[in-house]
Image (cartoon, rainbow, N blue to C red):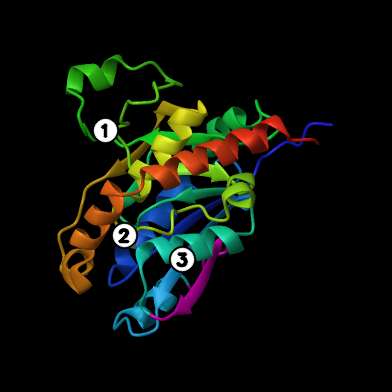
């Protein structure tokens, strides 16, 4: 019998942005068709001076779970959250996202339930151009399947825990912060299991605050991840082969 997927965890590391994280939570719940099927899972730093504000804002929120630990890489935090998520569908999301589509999660479930093996990446629409013109972006049909070399105009994505089961991670361990979406989407496109869902809107406006500046300058992370991106092709092809093998050998 085919397993039906109808629950999702939004995985969100956050630091110094309690009001943004709360806004992300509120919007996700406002537009979810079944709120009890959605979990927002936050990772907070123990040394975050705004930690108490997070805890106060989310004190009465039924559908949130919070882990706290040392200040660490964004990629590692996402992996921890995805691995320990309550639900089988896990979404890489930022605290600066506002979900704007009614029943957004149902469209995601419908896409995953087309595949018994659940190896799929669903990419929502953030209206960021990223190599597209506005006209090209608007011309993309809903449920658009990109070609293997095409870059998608969104940094966010949803995968099933079978993705993690096959590879051992959601976010590639080579990166600390940058290129996580570029790498993972490229793997999914080459596997032939990447779909851009234009009608699911995850509105994002990048915030240039102290937190963003710290991530981009701390420990020379940008240069380190640039190097990892330039040298990752062998690992990328290995991930593609692993996922294809999982699909070929999957049994209910």
Q: Which residue is mark 1?
A: 127
Q: Marks 1 and 3, how far apart in space?
A: 25 Å
Q: Marks 1 and 2, how far apart in space?
A: 22 Å
Q: Nearer the viewer, residue 119 or 1?
A: 119
Q: Say which mark, if any, is on residue 67.
A: none
Q: Which residue is mark 3?
A: 42
Viewer-nearest of discs 1 and 2: 2
Q: Quadrant of residue 73?
A: bottom left
Q: Quadrant of residue 198?
A: top left
Q: Which span of residues is magenta-colored?
A: 59-70
Q: Marks 2 and 3, how far apart in space?
A: 17 Å
Q: Quadrant of the N terminus?
A: top right
Looking at the image, residue 247 sits to the left or right of residue 221; the answer is right
Local packing at callout 2 (Cα closer than 10 Å; few below 14, some 14-19, many 20+) is: many
Q: Say which mark, if any, is on residue 177.
A: 2
Mark 3 lies on a secondary structure that is strand
Mark 2 lies on a secondary structure that is loop
Residue occupying image coordinates x 50% and y 25% = 192
Mark 1 lies on a secondary structure that is loop
Q: Earlier in the sequence, mark 1 or mark 2?
A: 1
Q: Quadrant of the C terminus?
A: top right
Residue 156 shows up from this direction: no
């Amino acid at each position: 019998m085919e397993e039906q997927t109808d629950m999702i965890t939004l995985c969100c590391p956050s630091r110094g942005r309690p009001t943004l994280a709360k806004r992300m939570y509120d919007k996700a719940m406002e537009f979810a068709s079944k709120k009890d099927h959605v979990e927002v899972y936050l990772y907070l730093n123990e040394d975050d001076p705004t930690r108490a504000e997070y805890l106060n804002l989310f004190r009465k929120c039924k559908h949130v779970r919070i882990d706290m630990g040392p200040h660490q890489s964004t990629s590692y935090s996402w992996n921890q959250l995805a691995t320990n998520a309550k639900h089988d569908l896990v979404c890489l999301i930022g605290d600066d996202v506002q979900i704007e589509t009614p029943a957004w999660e149902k469209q995601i479930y419908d896409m995953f339930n087309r595949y018994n093996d659940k190896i799929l990446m669903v990419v929502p629409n953030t209206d960021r151009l990223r190599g597209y013109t506005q006209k090209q972006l608007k011309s993309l049909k809903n449920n658009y399947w990109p070609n293997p070399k095409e870059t998608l105009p969104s940094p966010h994505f949803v995968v099933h825990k079978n993705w993690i089961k096959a590879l051992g991670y959601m976010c590639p361990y080579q990166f600390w912060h940058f290129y996580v979406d570029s790498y993972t989407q490229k793997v999914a496109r080459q596997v032939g299991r990447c779909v851009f869902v234009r009608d699911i809107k995850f509105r994002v406006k990048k915030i240039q605050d102290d937190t963003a500046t710290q991530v981009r300058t701390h420990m020379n992370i940008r240069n380190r991840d640039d190097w990892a991106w330039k040298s990752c092709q062998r690992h990328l092809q290995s991930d593609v082969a692993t996922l294809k093998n999982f699909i070929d050998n999957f049994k209910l």
